[in-house]
Image (cartoon, rainbow, N blue to C red):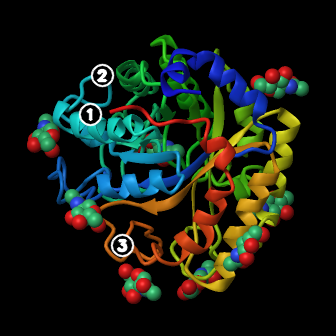
Amino acid sequence: MTLLSRVVSFGLTGLLLSAQSAAKIIYAGVNSAGGEFATQNLPGAFGTDYQFINESAINFFLNSGVNVIRVTFLLERMCPLETGLGNKFNETYFTNFQNAVNFITMAGGYAILDAHNYMRYNDPSMQPNSGSIIGNSSDPKAATTEQLASFWAELSNRFKSNPNVIFGVMNEPHDMPTELVLANDQASINAIRKSGAQQLILVPGNGFTGAQRWLNSTCSGCKPNSDVLTAIKDPMNNFAFDMHLYFDNDTSGTHNECTTAAPANLLPVTSWLAQNNYTAFLSEFGAGSNPTCFETLNNTLKWIEQNPQFIGWTYWAAGPLWGNYFLSVEPGIGPESNSTWPQILEPHIKTYQPVQSSSKRFER
Ligand SMILES: *[C@@H]1O[C@H](CO)[C@@H](O)[C@H](O)[C@H]1NC(C)=O
Ligand SMILES: *[C@@H]1O[C@H](CO)[C@@H](O)[C@H](O)[C@H]1NC(C)=O
Ligand SMILES: *[C@@H]1O[C@H](CO)[C@@H](O)[C@H](O)[C@H]1NC(C)=O
Ligand SMILES: *[C@@H]1O[C@H](CO)[C@@H](O)[C@H](O)[C@H]1NC(C)=O
Ligand SMILES: *[C@@H]1O[C@H](CO)[C@@H](O)[C@H](O)[C@H]1NC(C)=O
Ligand SMILES: *[C@@H]1O[C@H](CO)[C@@H](O)[C@H](O)[C@H]1NC(C)=O
Ligand SMILES: *[C@@H]1O[C@H](CO)[C@@H](O)[C@H](O)[C@H]1NC(C)=O
Ligand SMILES: *[C@@H]1O[C@H](CO)[C@@H](O)[C@H](O)[C@H]1NC(C)=O
């Protein structure tokens, strides 16, 4: 299908994609982190403290068969503390973000807009733990659920005519009532649909949205995602649960060793997804560069390729400012750009050519 006809028949394409999705990966790619970096510096300087993408890196990935990039941004930069969370944006920050998103989508890729805020707003300095939980009514400094909805109404309105945009409601909510995650997710979905945006929405759960413990309580007294998030309603029925997965001893993705068995860590959530007829998107997973981790990543990718509940994945992470961060796949720079990328990730992406070929590039 040509790109133009794909855009024109967007609604239909969406339906065809869901109908064809059995055991097919629709989206495969990487995170480009950086828009949320240096959280102690607000607003921070573009290009030094934070940066969304490196355009030549994006070209490298898209030319390698990748079709989706998850682009992180920080709510306190998009919505400065002076005006608070809501529909008043810092237009300078927004424009830089929009340039990155448009660069990806004009080149034919999908871009996931990732609010990288752990369901918190007002003090990102010590993410993931600092800042008031959005919608915590006992905290007078907390932004409200309505403010989060107002933010998503504005952002989705600005991108509703770009079919290659995917909305990532929130990165890794944690340590809060799961019912409040539900309320914030639902308010965001309602706001996005009310703006007229029809694109895919990625819906996170509690417990850092961890796939490996989706059926478990992840904080004192908080309910499992599996018990609460079944109440999610999307008027367009075009959402997937947003899931993350790491393989080190505390599933934090901060250690080089892979000690959790894959795909055993995905068995419970895969059954839950199947029983409830849901789909999931693995928007973060990452592992060290060593034989055990290679096998773990390989097994994980094979599992999600074999189970139609999973529609896509983005590896953690590329990004222009990582330097020698151990999980970085940034071309030519990241330690995994010449190991995990060519040995594990790229070979899987190459097997998705039939899916890739249906997403032609935008003409510039
Ligand atoms: C982008 O990546 C290229 C190739 O690695 C590099 O030469 C260039 O300096 C980078 N640009 C920015 C703005 O990071
Ligand atoms: C908006 O962002 C720009 C670029 O980072 C910055 O110079 C400016 O101070 C920001 N404005 C506010 C109100 O944060
Ligand atoms: C909500 O805010 C109150 C008051 O600051 C605080 O004591 C409580 O721990 C917060 N709730 C959560 C889940 O953190
Ligand atoms: C989740 O709960 C099940 C059943 O109680 C338990 O067997 C499993 O170890 C738990 N998983 C995690 C990751 O905590
Ligand atoms: C996890 O592994 C690291 C080594 O990479 C070790 O320092 C740490 O103590 C381990 N943590 C747990 C909870 O086992
Ligand atoms: C599962 O969801 C798909 C897509 O939303 C829908 O077409 C199908 O009818 C559903 N199947 C069941 C058994 O509910
Ligand atoms: C990954 O799996 C593929 C396909 O089964 C296989 O060809 C390849 O050798 C595996 N790579 C590693 C490093 O295990
Ligand atoms: C792989 O990349 C790392 C980091 O850029 C570099 O130190 C190493 O020499 C490279 N290895 C090879 C075989 O190119």
- The amino acid type, in three-letter code, at marker 1 is Cys
- The amino acid type, in three-letter code, at marker 3 is Gly
Mark 3–mark 2 distance (CA, rounded to whole Å): 38 Å
Q: How crowded is mark 1: few (under 14 residues within 10 Å), some or many (20 or more)?
A: many
Q: What element carries label 2?
A: loop
**Of callouts 3 and 2, the N-terminal one:** 2
Q: Residue at x 55, y 71 (%)?
A: 342
Q: What element carries label 3?
A: loop
- Nearer-the-camera pick, 130 or 95: 95
Residue at the disc numbered 1: 79
Q: Residue at x 66, y 42 (%)?
A: 355
Is residue 66 shown above or below 183?
A: below
The spot of residue 66 in percent (x, y) is: 53, 51
Residue at the disc numbered 3: 332
Quadrant where the C terminus sits is top left
Q: Determine if the C-beta at disc 3 is less than 8 A from ligand 1.
A: yes
